[in-house]
Amino acid sequence: MAGYWDGPEGEECPRRTWLTTRVGAAAGLVGSAYRIILLRPSTAIAALQMAAADSATMATLGAVFGLTTCLSAQIREKPEDPLNYFIGGCATGIVLGARARSYMTGTIACLGFGAAAALMKIGRQEGWRLSGPPRL
């Protein structure tokens, strides 16, 4: 997500939302390609509908995350707080639960996405790395 981390949090909300929307749409396309390969829809139209629905859902989730995180940073006036990312992840989970028409899915996704997003922000602040040689 080149460009997402440029500049302080809570500013340039439309640009940040656009970046997260694009990442969500790309993830939706990749996920729908795997889904189409594994489930083998009966027609090409069904495959196209599946890909469009998955991509639109993931793009929406990306947009909700980007917008909620940015607005939370503005409203709370704490741009570097990981709680903004928890709120954004939780809002994303709620939307996913609404899409699935399941309270349980929304609750679990809210907690899971919120925790993952907050940990991502904390890791970014503290310099955590997922790969590469250890720092001594």
Image (cartoon, helix red, strand yellow):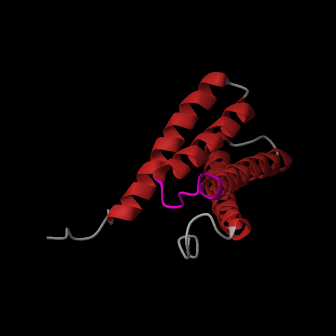
Question: Is 64 placed above or below 95 here?
Answer: below
Q: Position of residue 123 (x, y in %)?
A: 37, 58
Question: Which residue is depicted at the point 52% across and 45% down?
Answer: 86
**Residue occupying image coordinates x 64% and y 46%:** 35
Q: In the image shown, does 3 or 59 lie closer to the viewer?
A: 3
107 falls in the magenta region: no
Q: Residue furthest right?
A: 45
Left or right of 19, for residue 134: left
Question: Magenta segment range?
Answer: 73-81
Say which of 77 and 87 sits in front.
77
Image x and y of residue 108, in percent: 54, 30
Using the image, determine if residue 111 lies above or below residue 54.
above
Note whether 24 is above or below 104 in the view shown. Answer: below
Residue at coordinates 58% horizontally, 57% vertically from top-left? 77
Please, which residue is most extreme toward the left here?
Answer: 136
User: Can you tell which quarter of the image residue 127 is in?
Assistant: bottom left
Image location (x, y in percent) of residue 69? 61, 54
In the image, taking residue 29 as reference, residue 81 lies left or right, namely: left
